[in-house]
């Protein structure tokens, strides 16, 4: 019998238990803190932000499923069980959510929505006209599962899309592809709306600093829905307040929640969302986890298995 040890703070575990049981009623779903004895039989952990050391208490964990696509909430744990596969979320619900968020945000910046909202607050009827989608260059940082579905969602609007990844990619639906650190500045220089969909790794942390951000053309805007560690916030803020960058939509931050006294809250050209770009949905996630448990039980590699060396 499959046993799942589930951990998620502040949300109903019943919804998750029901979703898992709808896919396979025979699953034994144990929800923290009632996981039972660490010496009980083998189990699969399915967790989000477990406190450091928690998973190490269980000697019986066969694999760890992350409730999100990111795994920084797991790898920060110095006592994370070694030699246990870690599987990142990659269900359709997450992809649909991110495609929606990126489309909404890119459209908002292309159409000048931050400036229009500021005008509304000061009852200013002054009109301005946005540049057409076909004349707007979108650049997606990170061309993995979420970068690709976001690009696909944007294509029908006619945007001129480019994407940047670590490794070279084959031709993809007319999108201009860049890879590796050497091509980053060229990619940035052709980007009017930059979309961050990178994982947090030592290579990506602090990558978008003043120098890199300054390679974007004047008037560019930023959407960050990957991880907050990507952007040096003080550098972004000085480029936003000087008017070099026209706006930003930020869903993720180096420290979450963003401190109440943080100056970003007060910037008119910034839209702040509380890390909700793509939320893992119980129905699609339960199907994904159980499908991958079956793969592991057959001795196969799971989808989206974490490569510790790459960090994602
Ligand atoms: P994937 O692993 O599928 O894709 C990651 C992409 O980033 C790949 O294209 C990879 O390159 C690229 N990349 C990684 N490191 C580098 C680097 N050093 N230089 C250049 N490119 C790099 O991940 P997902 O698309 O599934 O998810 C991306 C991130 O989105 C997650 O890690 C998570 O942090 C975040 N996320 C945020 C959510 C939110 O609600 N805000 C929700 C879900 C995810 P290559 O293709 O060459 O390997
Ligand atoms: C994720 C997230 O990693 O929601 O999936 O941030």
Image: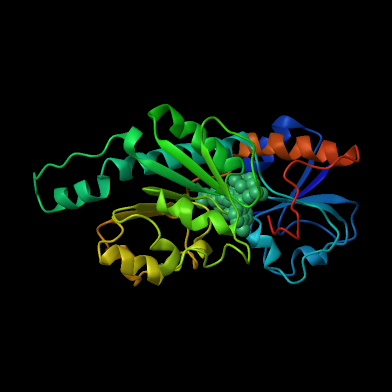
Q: Is residue 117 above or below residue 171?
A: below
What residue is at 41 percent from the left and 37 percent from the top?
160
What residue is at 52 percent from the left and 44 percent from the top?
163
Q: From the viewer's perspective, is 190 left or right of 37?
A: left
What residue is at 27 percent from the left and 62 percent from the top?
267
Residue 13 visible in the displayed image: no
Q: Quadrant of residue 131?
A: top left
Nearest the camera: 88 or 40?
A: 88
What residue is at 40 percent from the left and 60 percent from the top?
215
Q: Is residue 159 above or below residue 64?
A: above
Q: Is residue 47 above or below residue 105?
A: below
Residue 157 visible in the displayed image: yes
Q: Position of residue 132 (x, y in %)?
A: 28, 34
Q: Position of residue 44 (x, y in %)?
A: 80, 49
Q: From the viewer's perspective, is 274 left or right of 134?
A: right
Q: Position of residue 49 (x, y in %)?
A: 63, 60
Nearest the camera: 51 or 256?
A: 256
Q: Quadrant of the N terminus?
A: top right
Q: From the viewer's perspective, is 180 left or right of 276?
A: right
Type of colouring? rainbow
């Amino acid at each position: 019998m499959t046993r799942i040890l589930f951990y998620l703070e502040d949300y109903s575990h019943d919804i998750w238990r029901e979703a898992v049981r709808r896919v396979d009623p025979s699953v034994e779903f144990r929800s923290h803190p009632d996981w039972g004895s660490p010496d009980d039989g083998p189990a699969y952990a399915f967790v989000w932000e477990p406190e450091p050391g928690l998973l190490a208490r269980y000697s019986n964990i066969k694999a760890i499923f992350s409730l999100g696509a990111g795994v920084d909430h797991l790898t920060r744990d110095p006592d994370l069980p070694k030699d246990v596969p870690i599987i990142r979320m990659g269900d359709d619900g997450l992809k649909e959510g991110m495609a929606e968020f990126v489309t909404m945000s890119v459209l908002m910046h292309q159409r000048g929505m931050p400036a229009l909202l500021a005008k509304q607050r000061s009852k200013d009827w002054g009109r301005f006209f946005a540049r057409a989608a076909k004349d707007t260059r979108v650049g997606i940082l990170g061309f993995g599962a979420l970068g690709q579905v976001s690009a696909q969602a944007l294509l029908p609007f006619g945007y001129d899309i480019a994407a940047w990844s670590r490794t070279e990619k084959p031709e993809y639906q007319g999108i201009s592809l860049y890879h590796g650190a050497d091509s980053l500045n060229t990619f940035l220089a052709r980007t009017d709306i930059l979309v961050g969909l990178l994982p947090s790794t030592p290579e990506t942390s602090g990558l978008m600093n003043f120098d890199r951000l300054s390679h974007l053309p004047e008037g560019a805007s930023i959407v960050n829905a990957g991880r907050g560690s990507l952007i040096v916030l003080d550098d972004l803020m000085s480029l936003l307040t000087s008017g070099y960058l026209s706006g930003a939509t930020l869903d993720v931050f180096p420290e979450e929640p963003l401190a109440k006294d943080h100056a970003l809250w007060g910037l008119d050209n910034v839209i702040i969302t509380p890390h909700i770009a793509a939320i893992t949905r119980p129905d699609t996630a339960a199907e994904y986890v159980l499908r991958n448990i079956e793969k592991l039980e057959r001795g196969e590699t799971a989808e989206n298995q974490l490569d510790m060396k790459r960090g994602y």
